C-alpha cells in the first residue's frame, strides 16, 4: 500500500487525489453497535446497513490523523463520484415511456436509487483550505518501522490512537488463551 500511496503522492495529480481504502471484512467479530436502518428502494429486503466497515481516506485536502463519525456506506463512493462528475444523475428524471424514453436517456446514467441519494458523500472530509504536501517516502517508512517496533515492545507511541484504546474483554481472553497455548507447547507460528 505504501508503494501506491507514494506513486500518487509524487505524481502531478496529487492535489486532485482522493484515495479510499476499505477493509471490507469483519472476520466474524462482534460489533457492539447494531447496524442502523438504511434508506433503500426495497426496505423489506435491504432496510439496514450491515456490519461497520473501516476505511481510510487519503488526500492532501483531508486533515492528517482526523477521524469522522459520520455514517458512510459503500454507496458514499458512488455519490462522491456522481457529485463531482455528473450531478444530474442524482436527480430522479420525469418518467417517459417508449421511444422518447430511450432517446432522451441515451448516454446518461440511470437513476441510482434511494441508497445513493441518501448517502453522505466523502467530500465532507475534505476540510483543508490548502492542500498539504505529501511526506517524504523514507520518512513514512522510518515512522512505520518505529511504530511497529514500539508495538512489539508495548511502548507508547506519540499521537497513536491505537495505543490509547483499552483492550476489550474478548481481546484479553484471546491473549490469555494464546499465552496458555504457548505455555503448553503450541508453536508460535501456528494458528
Image (cartoon, grey):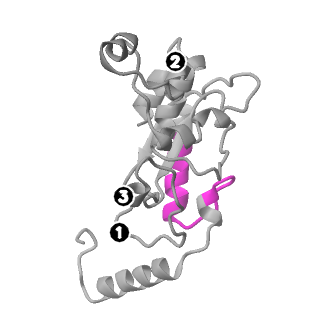
User: SS of the residue at dot 2?
Assistant: helix
Q: Which mark is residue 48?
A: none
> x%, y% of residue 128?
73, 29
In primary-sequence order, the first of circles 2 and 1 is: 1
The foreground one among 128 and 150 is 128
Residue displayed at 47% across by 77% down: 171
State the residue lying farthest toward the right: 129
Position of residue 109 in the picture relative to residue 72 (left or right): left
What residue is disc 2 on? 85
Tags 3 and 1 touching, CB below 8 Å: no
From this view, report whether residue 88 is shown above or below residue 70. above
Q: Mark 3 or mark 1, which is nearer to you?
A: 3
| Distance CA(mark 3)–CA(mark 2) | 30 Å
In primary-sequence order, the first of circles 3 and 1 is: 1
Residue displayed at 34% across by 10% down: 103
Mark 2 nearby-residue class (10 Å; few <14, some 14–19, many ≥20): few
> Is residue 146 covered in magenta?
yes
User: SS of the residue at dot 1?
Assistant: loop
> x%, y% of residue 58?
55, 34
The foreground one among 114 and 176 is 114
> x%, y% of residue 64?
67, 39
What residue is disc 3 on? 45
Position of residue 188 in the picture relative to residue 19 (left or right): left
The quadrant of the rendering that contains the C terminus is bottom left
The foreground one among 109 and 103 is 103
In primary-sequence order, the first of circles 3 and 2 is: 3
| Distance CA(mark 3)–CA(mark 1) | 22 Å
> Is residue 113 covered in magenta?
no
What residue is disc 1 on? 28
User: SS of the residue at dot 3?
Assistant: helix
Residue displayed at 53% across by 14% down: 13
| Distance CA(mark 2)–CA(mark 1) | 37 Å
Amino acid at each position: 500500500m505504501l508503494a501506491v500511496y507514494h506513486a500518487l503522492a509524487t505524481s502531478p495529480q496529487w492535489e486532485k487525489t482522493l484515495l479510499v481504502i476499505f477493509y471490507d471484512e469483519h472476520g466474524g467479530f462482534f460489533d457492539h453497535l447494531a447496524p442502523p436502518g438504511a434508506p433503500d428502494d426495497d426496505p423489506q429486503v435491504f432496510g439496514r446497513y450491515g456490519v461497520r466497515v473501516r476505511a481510510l481516506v487519503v488526500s492532501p485536502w483531508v486533515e492528517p490523523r482526523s477521524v469522522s463519525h459520520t455514517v458512510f456506506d459503500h454507496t458514499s463512493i458512488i455519490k462522491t463520484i456522481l457529485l463531482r462528475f455528473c450531478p444530474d444523475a442524482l436527480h430522479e428524471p420525469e418518467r417517459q415511456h417508449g421511444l422518447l424514453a430511450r432517446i432522451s436517456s441515451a448516454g446518461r446514467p440511470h437513476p441510482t436509487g434511494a441508497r445513493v441519494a441518501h448517502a453522505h458523500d466523502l467530500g465532507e472530509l475534505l476540510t483543508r483550505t490548502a492542500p498539504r504536501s505529501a511526506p517524504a517516502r523514507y520518512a513514512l517508512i522510518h515512522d512505520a518501522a518505529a511504530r511497529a517496533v514500539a508495538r512489539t515492545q508495548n511502548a507508547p507511541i506519540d499521537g497513536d490512537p491505537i495505543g490509547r484504546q483499552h483492550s476489550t474483554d474478548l481481546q484479553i481472553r484471546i491473549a490469555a488463551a494464546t499465552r496458555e497455548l504457548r505455555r503448553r507447547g503450541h508453536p508460535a507460528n501456528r494458528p
